[in-house]
Image: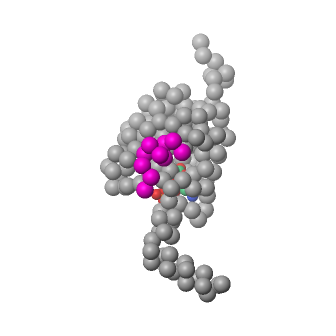
Amino acid sequence: MTDVNQSPRTILTYGTFDLFHIGHLRILERARALGDRLVVGVSTDGFNATKGKKSVIPFEHRRDIVAALRCVDLVIPEENWEQKIDDIRRHGVRVFAMGDDWQGRFDFLAEYCEVCYLSRTPEISTTAIKTDLEPERRDHLEAVTREVG
Ligand code: CTP
């Protein structure tokens, strides 16, 4: 018989992790600190396409970057909305963790494991990085820098 107290406390989270930034690192570190083992579902380009999203960095690169982190034990592909219960069972997950931008959206998983929403790092996101890189925004930044300089 498996003694649940002896088995590793496995945490599961998901994300796109495009243009990997400090908010991504912090949430993965916080998720890992909830237990002993962190499994991360990285969304595939195909899954993102069904949501009308296209990442700058392709899936294979996003997957390899996340897998290289010290706080991450295993990366799995996130290919659809329905796989979460299977993933929880397959990987013996005890805690499902997501950023609090998803607050309440995964409460239905509480039947299978603990559900935990972690606070986001303020003032950074993939969307904000993309906006800052837009040419008109760069001109604005250069003008501001000249004024300051
Ligand atoms: N995240 C975070 N703090 C941030 C940005 C993201 O904690 N400042 C978390 C999200 O809550 C999520 C995970 O990182 O649990 C992956 O988020 P993802 O959607 O890939 O990153 P975003 O930067 O939020 O991307 P976008 O701007 O495209 O929504």
Q: Quadrant of residue 35?
A: top right
Choose between 17 and 86: the one closer to the eye: 17
Quadrant housing the C terminus: bottom right
Vertical relation: 29 (above or below) 6: below
Task: State the image coordinates of residue 86 (x, y, percent, origin top left).
Answer: 43, 30
Vertical relation: 3 (above or below) 106: above
Query: Going 44% across and 38% down the picture, which residue do you hit?
Result: 77
In this picture, residue 4 sits left or right of residue 40: right
Quadrant housing the N terminus: top right
- Is residue 130 visible in the rendered image? The answer is yes
Choose between 51 and 116: the one closer to the eye: 51
Choose between 81 and 58: the one closer to the eye: 58
Q: Which residues are magenta?
A: 56-65
Task: State the image coordinates of residue 119 (x, y, percent, origin top left).
Answer: 61, 54
Query: Going 49% across and 32% down the picture, which residue do you hit?
Result: 88
In this picture, residue 130 sits left or right of residue 11: left
Judged by its main secondary structure, the magenta piece is: helix
Query: Going 48% across and 69% down the picture, which residue do you hit?
Result: 133
Vertical relation: 70 (above or below) 3: below
The number of numbered badges drawn on the structure is 0
Query: Going 57% across and 56% down the picture, which residue do you hit?
Result: 21
- Is residue 103 visible in the rendered image? The answer is no
Choose between 45 and 12: the one closer to the eye: 45
Task: State the image coordinates of residue 9 (x, y, percent, origin top left).
Answer: 63, 30
Task: State the image coordinates of residue 62 (x, y, percent, origin top left).
Answer: 48, 47
* Residue positioned most to the top: 1
Does the stretch in magenta take in 46? no
